[in-house]
Image (cartoon, grey):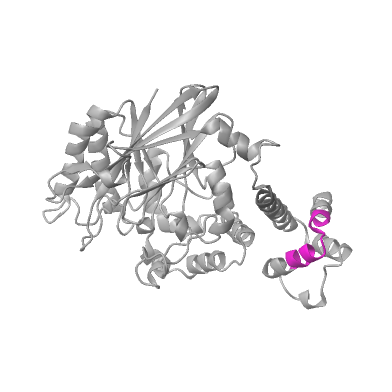
Amino acid sequence: MEISFIHLSDIHFRKTSGSSVDIDADLRNAILMDIKINAKSTLKNIKGILVGGDIAFAGQKKEYDFARKFLKEMTEQLEIDEKSVYCVPGNHDVNQALIRNSNSILNAQSEIEEANTIDNADYTFGKYITDEACPDLLYKPISEYNDFAVSYGCNIDQNRIVWTEEFPLDNNMKLKLLGMNSCIISSHKDHDGGDDQDVLNAREMVIGQNQIPSYEENVVWVLICHHPTIFWKFKDQILPKLDKRVDVQLYGHMHQQAIDASPERLVINAGATQPVRGTDWLPGYNWITFDCECVNGDRIIKVKAYPRVLSKDRDRFLCDDKSCSEGKIFFDYSLNIDEKRKRNLQDGSENKNEDVAEENDDIMVRQDIEKDIVYNFFELSYVQQNEVLNELKLLRSEYAGKRYVEIIESILQDARDNNCLEQMKTLIYAKL
């Protein structure tokens, strides 16, 4: 049973959208006509619309009101429920004016950004969203996005930092959508290095490890996220785990369509549906289908990505054959999901690159231990914290008068050097 989605990103509704000076009205009509004439005759079992962020241009209510009207028109054309929209925030969904005028939000974002390890960034993020005085501080800049997205079940906050939705496939397999937020620290500072799409100079976004899904039996994970991984801080640590667990990854932000496939995963960078006009203005969007077949006892996830691009005369959308498999109107991808899970999880199934795999595993194990240590260390009282450090001979005189949250990385480094991370974890657990 094949299921299908329409995949959009960077639709950038502005305060002028829907007005008499709306220059994108004809562009949107071309999308609706392409869906009516072409998508509906090609796709089977359409389940919804996937929106990869930058729904608005400045995170304002009026922009979302018009976005809702357009998405409703799309669902009517597709003959699906108007709530069948799945979205994530982008940097343009952030109310930058609010952040400019809030020292509290700026300071919180800066502390997360300046963390020197991914575990410290996660800890700092967790500290803010569990602050009883203002647990929603980091989500205030996307409050208008959340007001828009709550109707679709795609709102995110301190109680639900990602959203998921699942769809049945054949052969006892489920497709599970994961909505990730890459904009926790996004603000007007994104532009300090110039163009925020410039990979070399762009500000790096912080994505927490707690946004990466767990393995689930009989599940193929499909990620929707605004910023591609090249814009992520700590990406070298996150990507190995992400690629193992998330099988299809959908991104936006770049305004350029691109498809990258490996035996581990399929990555689709969407074109911008309503990009800012310039010399390289080329609107695009995608259709995507998923199916699960059984071959020789293994389940194969079959994905077809249909890239659509505006014609040169700006009259209609058509196939972007530069991104398609030879002789087809789509990019064809197959993933043996059972073999992939065995390769990444089952003892004795490693390939010849065993030393590298073991080294990566050791790093990930150590990172998990350190994350446990950091999290639970701060559950202890100050007296108990000192007892742990004193017993492990990690208590330095220069720590006097300092908050442990400020020097936790120094403590962890000492524990690494003294090979006592496991012992530290055990002592902390014993005092909880």
The relative height of residue 27 versus residue 421 in the rendered view (above or below) is above
Indicate left or right for 134 with 289 as reference.
right
Q: Position of residue 155 (x, y in %)?
A: 43, 45
Residue 39 vs residue 167, the one in the foreground = 39
Q: Position of residue 104 (x, y in %)?
A: 50, 67
The relative height of residue 332 versus residue 62 in the rendered view (above or below) is above
Identified at 74% across, 64% down, the residue is 412
- In this rendering, does residue 159 appear at all? no
Residue 354 vs residue 97, the one in the foreground = 354
Q: Residue furthest bottom?
A: 398
Q: Position of residue 28 (x, y in %)?
A: 19, 45
In which quadrant will I find the N terminus?
top left
- In this rendering, does residue 266 appear at all? yes
Start-end of magenta stretch: 411-424
The relative height of residue 341 versus residue 131 in the rendered view (above or below) is above
The relative height of residue 34 versus residue 366 in the rendered view (above or below) is above
Q: Residue furthest right?
A: 391
Indicate left or right for 50 with 245 as reference.
left
Residue 45: image quadrant is top left
Identified at 69% across, 66% down, the residue is 409
Q: Position of residue 400 (x, y in %)?
A: 78, 76
Most frequent secondary structure within the magenta stretch: helix
Identified at 28% across, 45% down, the residue is 285
- Residue 257 drawn in magenta: no
Residue 240 vs residue 174, the one in the foreground = 240
